[in-house]
Amino acid sequence: MASPIVLRGGGAPTVTGDHPLDNAVWAALTGPHAHLAERVGRAARYPADVYAFAALADPRDPAAWADLHALAGDGTTVRIKPVENAPDGWEITGGGEGVQLVATEEFRTEPAPEAVRLGPDDVPEILDLVARTRPGPFLERTVLLGTYLGIRHRGRLIALTGERLRLDGWTEISAVCTDPDHRGKGLATRLIRAVGHGIRERGDTPFLHAAADNTPAIRLYESLGFRLRRRSVIVSVRTPGTSGGTGPL
């Protein structure tokens, strides 16, 4: 294996710090989402149809990368965060920068009486809305990660927000999207507040991730009372070897 991972970030916490949000995917897969985890030693991932990310206990540890190779197999593409470099023999196939925001006391939560709880039977509609609005990854079984709420208009799903990563004491709000024909009505705000209400009711603190260049989304979250905690690098890497990896995990 190669030299240790080097992380940039202008003083941002390292992924091996004391705070679970520093390595949120790992904290979820070894915490409240452990029942969903596929794991080998110091590497873990969600099932490919649940959430397209893997995690390392410490990206600076060559043994963790060896465990990820054993878990994923040869020649397989894996998405992972927060890391920036990969060891020798691993190919970086893509990447980007994300931001993490956490709720402050200014974030006001409340139920949304018009919202309905979504489940597996609603997945076709959810996937259709996600395809049209592109809020981020949402797969066939992502709905199993937590509570998803939607708003319908004349029976059609027009807005969606839910829970994704869940750590001890923290839950991520995700999949915030609204049909283009129904934007400007405050639907996203109402759903974010409603999902946040459920998170706080069980004693967790809400947090969010967004692409660093998604300025409109970040502006909305900050207006609701979320504050930037850190920036991190997301990469897609291909494991060493030439076997039949069929696509990103």
Image (cartoon, rainbow, N blue to C red):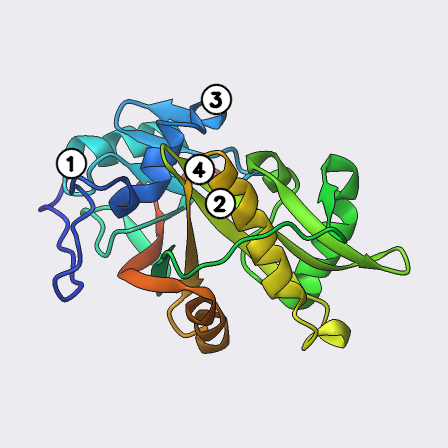
Q: Residues within 10 Å of mark 1 (few under 14, many from 20)?
A: some
Toward the left, the furthest residue is 3
User: Does 66 appear above or below 103?
Assistant: above
Number of callouts: 4
Is residue 246 visible in the rendered image? The answer is no
Task: Give SS at disc 1.
Answer: helix
In the image, is 175 to the left or to the right of 90? Answer: right
Q: Which mark is residue 207?
A: none
Q: How far from the left and from the top, in percent, is residue 3?
A: 9, 46
CB contact under 8 Å: marks 3 and 2: no
Whether residue 216 is visible, yes or no, is yes
Which corner quadrant holds the N terminus? top left
Q: Please name the amino acid that badge 3 sits on.
A: His
Query: Disc 2 marks which residue?
Result: 52
> Which amino acid type is marked by label 4?
Arg
Residue 166's mark? 4
Residue at 32 percent of width and 35 percent of height? 27
Q: Which residue is mark 3?
A: 35
Of the residues tagged 3 and 1, which is closer to the observer? 3
The CA distance from mark 1 to mark 4 is 27 Å
Q: Residue at image x 61%, y 45%?
A: 139
Residue type highlighted by circle 1? Pro
Question: Where residue 136 sits: x, y (%)?
Answer: 54, 58
Label 3 or label 1, whichever comes before in sequence order: 3
